[in-house]
């Protein structure tokens, strides 16, 4: 229930044990290793030789990128299917080592993929070339003559080419005016261009050629073509078909390679693990004989670490040290199983200052309640809890994902509770009576309930700040800055209680009168404290008075914070109402006999949609209430998350991490 | 008499219509940005989809008010009760907050969502933070929903 205490670690050992020790630390996964270079002078840095690390990394990176390429290439032909509940294969340490021995074999798979890929690229280029050739020939397909025969005879000149459509007639007329005998045949017409066959007597060559130029003639010469255009096109198309067959053949070969996929994945992760172990070496300082590393580890792990290192070698020097006063150390939380999922909410926001507090135990109950109210439907809660508890059992997720699943499973329980309280089971589908009240019938009661939660939440937030102040020895700050406000807010809430209950619930509550009186006095004392103390850091007497009075202006801030909790009411009502709308829609179709064929899918799809959209809304807005209204009162950010040196894999899960 | 019913229906229309138009614009803005990110990195589909969905809630709030008014007016039943002109206008007034605020806030929330999608494009791990920025804009849609809701519930015919 707190921020884990960390100790600084320094370890020196003989270089021959380096590999074994890195392996050990990697398996232990609870030591964060610092870059030692930051603690060294320029001169010292120069002594350290990192060249072999860089070489080794370059080699590993080359292998990794090759394997990645191979996996991606195979994935293009045989997609790696991912179902909703499908998971990464579970691989034992022995299998990783075994697969690593086959690296040559798997690299040859890479070579194969490479050559297949090259061929495919080649085919693609060929196909584009042939297709463009076909496009060139296609306009001439009406020309029923072998292209080789279209050439000048002794007296006649023959040309193929294009004109802009508008120029065809103009050219013909111009040729006639100049008395040039010219045969024009429009072979094909496009939107803009006309494809022409032109024949003219060689005597008229000069004048015709001049006219051609004048009207934007674009001559097309087919050299090396023997057959008729249509025959030629057919031949080219056959070529394309042939290439496509080849392509299919290659695709099949590539698909056959997918049998290596699992091995490739295992090898990839093996290489990734090796890479992590090599990369970390660049954070060490090493000479020819000795290496030194420094880092952080949780205090409770010190003995265990010492023992484990001693089991590897007896030539080592190990030192644990408390962080210096005020020295920042990496932040990790330690909470019991029930609270652990809620740590995620803080990790997503920002890590707290290492010398402040872990807000998880305070966040957890409120988040739990708020989420439940905002979804507010017992049947939805049941579905959520069921789905996510099953997912927890079946899926091997780690870190944030694992916490999120657990969080939603837990919040489902709260949703069941509030849904039952408000009588919402898939909205009003079953007409179940609420255990407490229906928010639709008593909206103001629901509103006030939300605001009460808001007041409590904010009081807890201010209280935590007071606790932090007291813990740090600032007792008076706690009384003047926090307790005073708690008195104002708490007192005012009590003072307003009978007023609200009279006004909104239409049920006078005379027994509240005494409490209200007390609340008023508490508020006044709080205000007096604020007036007298908020100017205490100011030197000038006027500023003292002004700061005291001015601080009361903060009441508007608290007011808007509290009103912000009305979203509990709005979102809770929203999900119930949409559920009701879905039920109405299904009801319009009819909930009996043959109509069920339509109305049941409406119900299922509608309610799943509603659950998804409201689940998202509840998640977002419950977080927001923590981050803005709650954390604003006490949270001190600025910590860095604890990032232990640990094994990370991409495609596989490790069965026995202690042996990898 | 009939004018009263007309204005009541206008209230339903304003609530659902304006809020839904706003959501359509907002989700479309965010959707375009999300599609751009997904072209680069298809794995970010889920994360960006969440952000795209955020400006969609205003339409739902409008729908809630619309349906609430309809059920009060007995639109789903056989006969709609007669309303005075004032009653009808009050329904119209009650539909305005969620309609108008929904329209405008959804568009601006969409813009905030676009920016947050930009966060996801560069910092995939920061969905938790990115989601909060558009959510702040939504607060005002929620407030208008509450007001419309209380106004409508206060209008028992």
Image (tube, coloured by chain):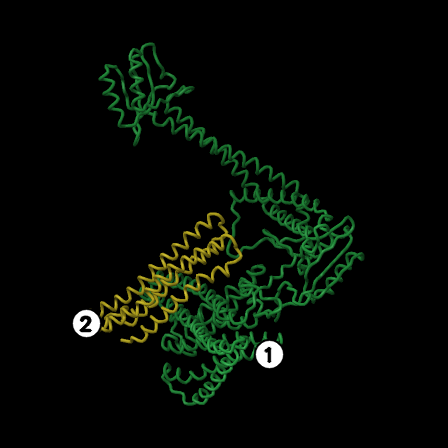
Chain colours: A green, B yellow
A169 w.r.t. A373: above or below: above
Residue under label 2, please give it: B1
Q: Quadrant of residue A60?
A: top right
User: Separation of disc 1 and disc 2 at Cα?
Assistant: 69 Å
Asked if the residue at tag 2 contacts the one at tag 1, i.e. Cβ–Cβ closer than 8 Å, the answer is no
In the visual, does B89 lie left or right of A496?
A: left
Which class describes the residues within 10 Å of circle 1: few (<14), some (14-19), or many (20+)?
Answer: some
Q: Nearer the viewer, mark 1 or mark 2?
A: 1
A655 w.r.t. A464: above or below: above
Q: How many marks?
A: 2
Residue under label 1, please give it: A475
Residue A651 image position (x, y, % from top left):
58, 51
Q: Quadrant of residue A316?
A: bottom right
Q: Give the residue at x 56% y 55%.
A: A87
Q: Residue furthest left?
A: B1
In the visual, does A632 lie left or right of A657?
A: left
Q: Secondary structure at mark 1?
A: helix
In the visual, does A650 lie left or right of A169?
A: right
Which residue is at the front of the view, B44 or A598? B44
Which residue is at the front of the view, A35 or A3? A35
Q: Secondary structure at mark 2?
A: loop
A32 w.r.t. A247: above or below: below
């Amino acid at each position: 229930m707190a921020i884990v205490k960390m100790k600084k670690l320094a370890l020196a050992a003989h270089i021959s044990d380096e590999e074994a020790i890195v392996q050990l630390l990697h398996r232990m996964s609870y030591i964060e290793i610092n870059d030692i270079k930051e603690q060294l002078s320029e001169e010292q840095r120069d002594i350290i030789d990192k060249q072999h690390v860089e070489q080794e990394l370059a080699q590993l990176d080359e292998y990794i990128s090759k394997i990645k390429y191979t996996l991606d290439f195979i994935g293009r032909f045989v997609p790696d299917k991912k179902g909703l509940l499908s998971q990464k294969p579970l691989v034992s340490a022995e299998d990783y080592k075994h697969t690593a021995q086959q690296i040559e074999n798997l690299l040859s798979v890479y070579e194969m993929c490479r050559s297949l890929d090259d061929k495919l690229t080649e085919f693609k280029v060929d196909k584009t070339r042939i297709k463009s050739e076909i496009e060139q020939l296609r306009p001439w397909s009406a020309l029923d003559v072998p292209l080789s025969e279209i050439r000048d005879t002794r007296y006649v000149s023959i040309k193929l080419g294009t004109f802009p459509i508008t120029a065809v007639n103009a050219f013909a007329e111009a040729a006639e005016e100049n008395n040039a005998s010219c045969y024009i045949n429009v072979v094909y017409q496009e939107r803009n261009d006309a494809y022409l066959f032109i024949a003219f007597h060689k005597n008229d060559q000069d004048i015709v050629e001049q006219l051609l130029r004048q009207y934007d003639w674009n001559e097309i010469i087919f050299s090396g073509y023997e057959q008729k255009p249509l025959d030629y096109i057919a031949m080219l198309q056959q070529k394309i078909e042939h290439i496509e067959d080849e392509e299919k053949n290659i695709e099949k070969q590539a698909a056959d390679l997918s049998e290596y996929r699992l091995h490739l994945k295992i090898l990839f992760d093996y290489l990734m693990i090796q890479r992590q172990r090599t990369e970390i070496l660049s954070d060490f300082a090493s000479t020819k004989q000795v290496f030194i590393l420094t880092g952080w580890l949780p205090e409770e792990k010190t003995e265990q670490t010492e023992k484990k290192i001693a089991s590897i070698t007896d030539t080592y020097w190990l030192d644990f040290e408390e962080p210096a006063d005020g020295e920042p150390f990496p932040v990790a939380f330690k909470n019991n199983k029930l609270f652990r999922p809620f740590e995620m909410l803080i990790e997503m926001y920002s890590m707290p200052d290492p010398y402040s507090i872990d807000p998880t135990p305070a966040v957890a109950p409120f988040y739990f309640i708020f989420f439940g109210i905002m979804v507010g439907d017992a049947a939805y809660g049941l579905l959520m809890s069921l789905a996510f508890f099953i997912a927890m059992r079946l899926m091997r997720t780690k870190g944030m994902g694992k916490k999120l699943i657990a969080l939603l499973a837990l919040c489902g329980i709260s949703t069941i509770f509030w849904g039952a309280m408000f009588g919402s089971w898939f909205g009003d589908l079953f007409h179940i009576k609420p255990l407490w009240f229906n928010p639709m019938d008593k909206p103001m009661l629901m509103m006030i309930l939300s605001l009460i939660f808001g007041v409590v939440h904010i009081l807890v937030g201010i209280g935590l700040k007071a606790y932090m102040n007291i813990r740090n020895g600032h007792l008076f700050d706690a009384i003047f800055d926090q307790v005073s406000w708690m008195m104002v807010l708490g007192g005012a809430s009590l003072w307003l209680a009978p007023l609200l209950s009279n006004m909104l619930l239409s049920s006078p509550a005379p027994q509240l009168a005494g409490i209200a009186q007390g609340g008023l006095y508490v508020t006044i004392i709080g205000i007096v404290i604020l007036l007298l103390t908020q100017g205490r850091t100011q030197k000038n007497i006027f500023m003292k008075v002004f700061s005291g009075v001015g601080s009361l202006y903060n009441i508007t801030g608290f007011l808007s914070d509290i009103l912000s909790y009305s979203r509990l009411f709005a979102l809770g009502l929203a999900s119930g109402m949409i559920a009701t709308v879905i039920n109405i829609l299904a009801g319009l179709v009819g909930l009996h006999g043959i109509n069920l064929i339509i109305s049941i899918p409406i119900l299922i799809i509608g309610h799943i949609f509603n659950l998804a959209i409201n689940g998202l809304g509840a998640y977002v807005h419950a977080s927001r209430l923590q981050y803005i209204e709650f954390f604003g009162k006490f949270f001190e950010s600025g910590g860095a998350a604890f990032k232990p040196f640990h094994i990370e894999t991409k495609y596989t899960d490790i069965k026995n991490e202690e042996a990898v | 008499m009939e004018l009263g019913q007309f204005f009541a229906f206008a209230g339903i229309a304003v609530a659902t219509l304006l809020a839904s138009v706003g959501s359509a614009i907002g989700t479309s803005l965010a959707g375009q940005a999300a599609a751009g990110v997904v072209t680069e990195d298809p794995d970010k589909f889920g994360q960006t989809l969440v952000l795209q969905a955020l400006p969609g809630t205003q339409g739902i709030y409008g729908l809630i008010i619309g349906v609430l008014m309809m059920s009060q007016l007995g639109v789903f039943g056989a006969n709609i009760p007669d309303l005075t002109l004032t009653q009808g206008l009050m329904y119209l007034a009650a539909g305005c907050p969620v309609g108008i605020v929904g329209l405008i806030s959804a568009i601006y929330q969409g813009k905030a969502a676009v920016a947050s999608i930009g966060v996801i494009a560069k910092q995939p791990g920061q969905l938790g933070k990115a989601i909060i920025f558009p959510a702040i804009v939504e607060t005002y849609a929620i407030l208008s929903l509450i007001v419309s809701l209380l106004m409508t519930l206060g209008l028992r015919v």
